[in-house]
Structures are given as structure tokens and as C-alpha cells.
């Protein structure tokens, strides 16, 4: 992995480029050095030159909190947001486009879901992304909220392109300006290349403790390209993406805390090379994340050696329990459930 990182860090493309990674790939299992320690002193750091397109805001949210649950539990809804922790979530909203945006009850339910969380990584935004995103923010506004959003460009190999997005509570979270970019994939190693963005909690420093700053890598794999230990398995590309993004961000911004989150289309036992990175864990494990509650597709991955801000609370939000609806009604919202994890609002001391 040191060679891979060296090649990427020496490139002058202005982006994290998957083709540079691919040129270094071999047939042997990956060997990982300490990714943060080994990045210090690397030459010619990349400069992210993606897009930055924050979207309209809503006005902040009198939000209800998901009741605290143990690790790997399906959660119910409680009240109030914690002053000592934030909730980060990922949600694949099936075909989140103009048609869904026109359904008032579904949008009301989606707004209520987003109110549970401080930052949400969204997958499967279709068509003009401004239509569903602005409809969501407008609905949150009606509930008294102040959320903002940023989205990426349409991506994909077919006519059914989609966008990634991030939505956050602007009373509790700051989006780091111009921190969002797409992973460059000139070699077309992935159907949908990931989107990256960085955030920071909105708290005043206390006793020299700083606000928690973190970088999110938003992912939606192709379900046909995550099978077997093959070179075209997208999970065998995402391990290099995870390592490369955090080396780049550490070198350029001093960033230490990273989460890869989204719809990976596999359970925790099939994460391939991504699951072999030392310290990397899926915070919800094998809890079912589809609305039918039969499969685990969605994950929040962290390096547990480094991101010690994780407070050991995570889960899957049960839409049926939250709204008192049956499964068919829940499927109108999405075929996936929101997955979440909770983190301290303050940076933890370095773990290395």
C-alpha cells in the first residue's frame, strides 16, 4: 500500500485518481502500513479539485432523537438531540427523484427521518437533484428546521445515472467549504465513483478540546460488481480509495477521522479487501438494513484505532416502528433503512 499511496501522492492530476491505484494493483493480498503515520512527509500532495455546490437551507430543526440503543440494535424514536454527541447516518432512498418528491406524505416522512440525524449521506438521487433535495429541505423547514445540503454530479455507466448527496443540521454541523469532491475514475474501475466531503461540529472548544472534524466517503456499489475475490470487485477498489483519501486529507488538512458509508451491497463478511484494512470495522455489523429486514447492504466503516470519538452507539432506524406503518408503506419511502452511528462532539486525544 505504501507504493500505491506514493504513486497517488506524487500525481499532479488534482484529484484522487483510481487509475493511479489500478496501475499499482497486483495479485497478492494487500499489506497495509499505518496509513496516517506513513503519510507524514509524503511529497507532492494532491489538491482536491472537485466541485462545490451547497444547496438551499432550511431553518433548524426541533428534532426528535432516536432512543439510545446498544451496538448493532434496531432503534426506535425518542425525543431531543444530545448536547455531547452527534448522529451520522447513511440512507439509500430508492429512486429519490421528481416522482418521489411529489408525494407529500412520503416527503413528510423523509423529513422526519432526517430530523433524527445531524449529517446524512444520501445515495440514489435521480434526475435533477435539486428537485428532491429542495423538496426535502422545504419539508424540513415546515417542521421548523434549518438543514442544508450539497450534491454531486450525475454519475454512472448507464442512462440511469444518480447523484450522491449530504444533508446536515446547520445549527449543529458546519460543512467545510470547498471540501467536497468526486474521486476521479478515468480507468472506469467503479460504476459510481465515491463522493467525499468534510464536516465539523458546531461547539465551542472546552478545556482545550476541539470540535470533532471528520471526512465522509459516500459510496454506492454496483450489486453485480461485488462478488468474489476478483480484480473487478468494487470492494477491492474501495480499500485503496479509503486509504488514499485519508492519506491525502491528512497530508493536506491534518484530517484524522474518516467514515466510508453507504450502500455496499454486501454483508460484513464479504467486504473483501476493504474489510482487511487493520482496524476498520462496520459499526452496525450484520443487522439487516433493507426494509424487508432480510439482508445487510448498508454500512458505516471507521478505523476504530483512530476514530475513537465513536461512543459505541449505532443502529438501524426501523421505519415501520417510527411511523406505525406496515411494510408496504415503508417500502414507499425506500427499500433501504437508515443506518446511523453516534460520535462525540469533541475531538478525542490522538490514538497514536
Image: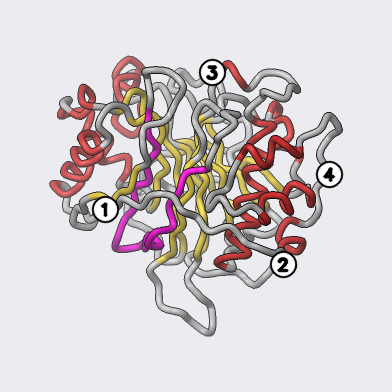
**Mark before the other along the chain sequence, 4 or 3:** 4
Furthest toward the bottom, the residue is 207
Q: Which residue is mark 3?
A: 294
Q: Position of residue 219 (x, y in %)?
A: 51, 36
For label 1, the crowd category at 10 Å Cα-Cα, with few meaning under 14, some 14 to 19 and many 20 or more, is many
For label 4, the crowd category at 10 Å Cα-Cα, with few meaning under 14, some 14 to 19 and many 20 or more, is few
Give SS at disc 1. Answer: strand
Residue 304 circle label? none
Q: Quadrant of residue 336?
A: top left
Q: Can the viewer see residue 318?
A: no
Give SS at disc 4. Answer: loop
Q: Which residue is mark 1?
A: 147
Q: Residue at x 67, y 49 (%)?
A: 243
- The residues colored magenta run 162-183
> Of discs 1 and 3, which sits in the foreground?
1
Q: Residue at x 48, y 48 (%)?
A: 196
Q: Which residue is mark 4?
A: 31
Q: Which residue is mark 2?
A: 40
| Residue 27 located left or right of residue 199 | right
How far apart marks 2 and 4 lie (CA) works out to 18 Å
Above or below, comparing residue 203 to residue 303 in the picture: below
Q: Is residue 167 magenta?
A: yes
Q: Residue at x 13, y 46 (%)?
A: 142
Furthest toward the front, the residue is 12
**In the depicted view, which residue is nearer to us: 43 or 40?**
43
Give SS at disc 3. Answer: loop
How far apart marks 4 and 3 lie (CA) works out to 34 Å
How far apart marks 1 and 3 lie (CA) works out to 32 Å
> Of discs 2 and 4, which sits in the foreground?
2
**Mark before the other along the chain sequence, 1 or 4:** 4
Amino acid at each position: 500500500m505504501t507504493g500505491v499511496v506514493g504513486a497517488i501522492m506524487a500525481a499532479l492530476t488534482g484529484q484522487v485518481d483510481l487509475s493511479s491505484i489500478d496501475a499499482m494493483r497486483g495479485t497478492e493480498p494487500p499489506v497495509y502500513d499505518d496509513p496516517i503515520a506513513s503519510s507524514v512527509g509524503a511529497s507532492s500532495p494532491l489538491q482536491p479539485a472537485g466541485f462545490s455546490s451547497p444547496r438551499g437551507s432550511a431553518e433548524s430543526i426541533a428534532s426528535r432523537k432516536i432512543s439510545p440503543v446498544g451496538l448493532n440494535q434496531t432503534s426506535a424514536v425518542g425525543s431531543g438531540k444530545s448536547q455531547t454527541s452527534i448522529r451520522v447516518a447513511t440512507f439509500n432512498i430508492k429512486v429519490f427523484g421528481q416522482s418521489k418528491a411529489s408525494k407529500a406524505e412520503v416527503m413528510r416522512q423523509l423529513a422526519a427521518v432526517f430530523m433524527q440525524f445531524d449529517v446524512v449521506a444520501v445515495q440514489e438521487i435521480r434526475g435533477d437533484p435539486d428537485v428532491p433535495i429542495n423538496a426535502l429541505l422545504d419539508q424540513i423547514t415546515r417542521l421548523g428546521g434549518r438543514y442544508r445540503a450539497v450534491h454531486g454530479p450525475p454519475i454512472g455507466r448507464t442512462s440511469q445515472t444518480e447523484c450522491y448527496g449530504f444533508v446536515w443540521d446547520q445549527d449543529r454541523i458546519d460543512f467545510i467549504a470547498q471540501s467536497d469532491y468526486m474521486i476521479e475514475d478515468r480507468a472506469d474501475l467503479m460504476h459510481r465513483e465515491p463522493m467525499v466531503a468534510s464536516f465539523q461540529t458546531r461547539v465551542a472548544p472546552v478545556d482545550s478540546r476541539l470540535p470533532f472534524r471528520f471526512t465522509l466517503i459516500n459510496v454506492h456499489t454496483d450489486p453485480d460488481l461485488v462478488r468474489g475475490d476478483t480484480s473487478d470487485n468494487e470492494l477491492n477498489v474501495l480499500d485503496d480509495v479509503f486509504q488514499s483519501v485519508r492519506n491525502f486529507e491528512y497530508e493536506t488538512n491534518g484530517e484524522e477521522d474518516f467514515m466510508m458509508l453507504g450502500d455496499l451491497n454486501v454483508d460484513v463478511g464479504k467486504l473483501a479487501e476493504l474489510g482487511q484494512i487493520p482496524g476498520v470495522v462496520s459499526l452496525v455489523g450484520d443487522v439487516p438494513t433493507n426494509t424487508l429486514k432480510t439482508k445487510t447492504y448498508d454500512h458505516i466503516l471507521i478505523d476504530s484505532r483512530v476514530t475513537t470519538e465513536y461512543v459505541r452507539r449505532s443502529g438501524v432506524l426501523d421505519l415501520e416502528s417510527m411511523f406505525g406503518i406496515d411494510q408496504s408503506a415503508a417500502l414507499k419511502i425506500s427499500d433501504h433503512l437508515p443506518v446511523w452511528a453516534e460520535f462525540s462532539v469533541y475531538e478525542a486525544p490522538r490514538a497514536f
